[in-house]
Amino acid sequence: MYENPTADRLVEMRSVEYAHFSALGTWEYEREPCKICGWHWQTIVPPLLVQWEPSTDVTGDVSWDGPFGYTFVVRQQVAKALNAMHFDCSFLPVEYVKPERKRNTVPFPYRGPRLLWGRCSASVELDMAASAVTLESSCSACGDVRYTFRNKGIVIRPTSWKGQKMFRITTNGRSGATFVTEEARRLLEGARFSNISFSEAGQILQ
């Protein structure tokens, strides 16, 4: 346990060395969109449909949805390592979609190492005032509420954090933006996985 450990956002290394993809679904609709605010109950469910984008034909230990996306897939050995280190993450199946442009992409059909969709299963409440999170909108018809999106300047109180190494933030809604503790960052850096980096996001108070 670290004194006032930092929280770091899990991000792509932004390296042109590794391929990235577009996540095309699969999408599931719980009900019709709200006629007042337009909010939809659209949820992405497995299998994750991956279409490799023109970038390079080299995949990393971790691959990302676009150059700045939050959805990620990992090689099977990475999934096993994260499970062994007790990260709050589930690993789900991936299927591949034929790319529209074949030049400079991962070959289709994909024949590389098995990849799994990594989806963080833990969520944490922010100290909304200290993190400058405010209510952005609220729909009286469907009950949808939206808050300021935060991926930096976050503050987490000890009553909200139960020791999770990896987590998402409740007020970020359905965003896949994923955060790790300082301890978790050090574990991941020690594992030397390719195509993964970290951006300082805030603090977990003790």
Image (tube, rainbow, N blue to C red):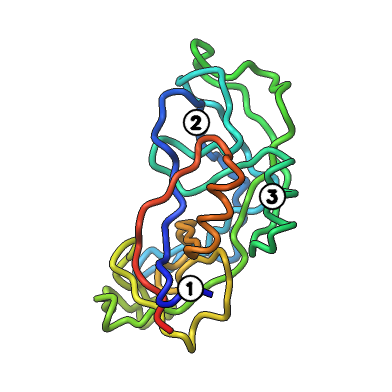
Q: At which x and y percent is residue 67?
A: 40, 35
Residue extending farthest to the top is 103
Contact? badges 1 and 3 (CB < 8 Å): no
Q: CA distance from mark 1 to mark 3?
A: 36 Å
Contact? badges 1 and 2 (CB < 8 Å): no
Residue linked to disc 3 = 46
Q: At which x and y percent is residue 12?
A: 44, 41
Instruction: Tell me the SS state at disc 2.
Output: loop
At x 42%, y 38%, the residue is: 13
Q: Amino acid at mark 1?
A: Tyr
| Looking at the image, residue 206 lies above or below residue 146 | below
Residue linked to disc 2 = 20
Q: At which x and y percent is residue 128?
A: 32, 81
Q: Amino acid at mark 2?
A: His
Q: CA distance from mark 2 to mark 3?
A: 19 Å
Residue linked to disc 1 = 2
Q: Quadrant of residue 122?
A: bottom right
